[in-house]
Every structure is written in structure tokens, then in C-alpha cells.
Image (tube, grey):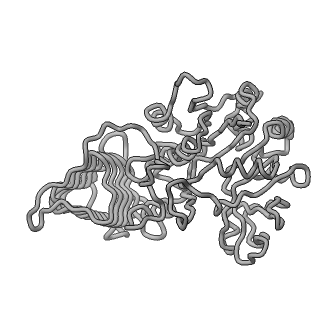
Amino acid sequence: MQLRVLAFVLAGGKGTRLYPLTKERAKPAVPFGGRYRIVDFVLSNLINSEIHSIYVLIQFKSQSLLQHIREGWETGGLLKSHFIIPVPAQMRMPGEEWYRGTADAIYQNINLIEQAAPDIVIIFGADHIYRMNIRDMIEFHVAKRAKVSIAAIPAPKQEAREFGVIETNNEGAIVGFHEKKADAPTMPGDPSRVYASMGNYVFSTELLLRELYADAEREDSSHDFGRDILPGLIGQAEMFAYDFQTNRIPGDPAEQPVYWRDVGTIDAYYEASMDLRSVKPELNLYNRQWPLRTAGYQDPPAKFTFDLEGRRGTAVDSIISGGAILSGGSVKNSIIGRGVKVHTGASIEDSVIFDNCDIGRHARVRRAILDKNVKVPADATIGYDLERDRKYHHVTETGIVVVEGHRSHVDLSTMQF
């Protein structure tokens, strides 16, 4: 029997730890890999897994996310079961409140579940960079006759305080939850690692509806799956941990390791970006059987111009997006967004440059993230004098310089370089 599957994508978080990249946009709308957005990963995983009934729950600073979904993802096919629809907070509570937690986000849209009457409901976050064959997890859920399945990834024991940790028995059944505890129980047979929850869930519809209604009545609840609903189901329902390490992507080599990154901080986001530009990247974007989809931008090809000593457009170990022009400048170990211009003698190293930036003649940028529309003047430097950079920009503890952008160009020429 073909299961009816309804998917919810939770895309309403503030993303405060990614500030200033989230100053003007929702976290799932933050650019990644040159031409993509973070939300593209979960949506691509769903579509590639042949899951086509998808609601995207949005909330904070949602305009950028709405625009991206409408430009590249909204579908209106002949089949009623094929759709990707963004859904803002419905204000269904008596106090007309925004989403109070992950469970409340689903509860405020509970009518969508009741109308669709699916066999199972899957709830996935939009905050992470990963590739996943979700059908594998659904098949695991069915084979185990589970009421709830939670995607889990092994993590070093010393990192337990950073995650919600799932405690399982030898058969993978969930027997406990431990929220960011350094002494959380390790995996069965592996004292060096713990099972970290990925925040991706598969629910039987009947159980989910029952628990959402019950949770909404609890005044002492934070209305969150990880904190309230799931711990309350221990011993009450069949729950299993799905080991993400067993997931296989069609078209990938058998030895290809799974990839999942929490890009909740600037440093984590930067490191995940750098994962893309190596000769054999940990995150493979070039598997045609599992494409990473996004909006259909009508960009011209990237262009490299001039072949003179000291004036040569080059790029090494980098990703260059459509419409970018390297006019005598050099790029190394970097991600270059759409429509970026790199002028004569300019150099960019170990950096992430968002769309429509303009790097002036002989300017130098190193270990930096430039948001959209930043204009770096000729001869300027970013990332070479961190004390000076801190006067004008956000600098992380590891020395990554983040230059804020805007809807129109941000010209740095008024600053002291």
C-alpha cells in the first residue's frame, strides 16, 4: 500500500546566533554555496525522496524566504497532492500568539493535517545543511511499526552538552531524552559517542493529533517536541531512533559518508561553506541523481577576463556562481555568489562572497563573509587587520570578518582603510 505522507518544514526560527546574516532575512533564507539558500537542502531532500505534499511554516523576517519559495519552489500542478506552500503563523490561539514552540507551530496548522488525512506526518527543520534520502527513514518507520521515529546522528560524547541526546536500547528503541547534558548516556556498545537528535521526525497521524491536542491544554508546557511531547511518550508509544549513518543517497559512491551540519553560528556556517570548495568535497553538489534544487535564476555564465601578468582572472579550489566576472582578479578557496565583480589586482582568499558584491582594484579580502551588495573600494583590505575590522564589522572569536549588506549597495569607502 502506498502511504499518504504529509510534510511540514519548520522554517520560523530567528537564527539569532547567525547574526548579522539574519539581520534582514530568516535563517532558512541565508545564502549558501553561491546560488542556494539553506532551506533548499530540506526541500530538495523531500522532492528527491518523492514527497510532494509540503507545507513550509514561516514566521520571523519571512519576506526573503517567501520570495525565494515563490520564485523557485511553489508548485500548482494538476495533482492536488503536489504542492509546496509557505504558511505564516495562523494566530489560532486565544491570545493570537505567534508560534510558541515547534509543537505549537504544527498545532496552529492542525486543520491542514485533518483535511489531508495522511497516514504519516513528517516534520523536518530548515536550519541544517544535509543530504538525506527521507524514504529510507519512512521505510524504517514502517518496518519497526513505530508510532514515532527520530533521525539521529552519532556525535562525540564530549559534545553531548550541545545537543538533545537520545537514549536507546540495543534494538534502537528510545528509552530516554537528555537535553544538552554533558553526562548523557552513550550509544549502546559505543562509550565514545552519543545519539544526537537531528530534529527530524516521522509520526503516525493518529498519535500526533492526540498529542498536539493534549499539549495545547497544558499550561506548564513550552509546546516543543523535544522538551515536552517526545519525553512524555517514553514508555507510552513505540519510538525508535533512525541512525542517519545508514542513510544512502542514490548516485553516491557506497563509501560516501553521510553529511549533516548544524550551521547555527557564523563559524559553523563558514566551515560548512569551506567544505564545498575542496577537490573531493564532503558535501557533493554534483550528483545528478540527487540534485540540489533552487530558484531558476536567469544568470549569464561566469566570466574570467584578461591574461596579463598581474592582471589575470583566475579561480582555484573555488565555486563561482552565474553572472560573476573576474576581471583580472584572483579567487582562492572561496565561494563567489551571483553577479559578483572582482576587479584588476583584487584577491579573495578563504571567503564567502554573497550576490552582487563589487571588489575594487587591488582590494584584498581574506577569511571573510560579505553579505549581499557590499562594495569594497580599491586598495581596501578586509581580514588582514582584525582590530581595525572590529571597529566597523562583526568579527567572530576565530577571526571571521562579517561585513553587513543591504538591499542596495553598501559602500565601504567612507571607512578608514
Q: In the rendered image of this protein, does residue 393 appear above or below residue 217?
A: below
Q: Quadrant of residue 273?
A: bottom left
Can residue 73 be seen? yes
Q: Quadrant of residue 169?
A: bottom right
Q: Locate residue 310, reporting x and y percent.
A: 12, 67
Figure quadrant of the N terminus? top right
Q: Locate residue 146, reporting x and y percent.
A: 81, 49
Q: Is residue 159 left or right of residue 381?
A: right
Q: Nearer the viewer, residue 365 or 45?
A: 45
Q: Is residue 100 left or right of residue 44?
A: right
- Residue beneath the point at 21% across and 51% down: 303
Q: Nearer the viewer, residue 252 or 371?
A: 252
- Residue beneath the point at 28% across and 56% down: 415
Q: Is residue 295 left or right of residue 261?
A: left
Can residue 410 be seen? no
Figure quadrant of the C terminus? bottom left
Q: Quick one: which residue is furthest to the left in this view? A: 308
Q: In the rendered image of this protein, does residue 169 appear above or below residue 230?
A: below
Q: Locate residue 364, reporting x and y percent.
A: 25, 64
Q: Is residue 118 left or right of residue 127?
A: right
- Residue beneath the point at 85% across and 51% down: 238
Q: Quadrant of residue 174?
A: bottom right
Q: In the rendered image of this protein, does residue 285 appear above or below residue 348?
A: above
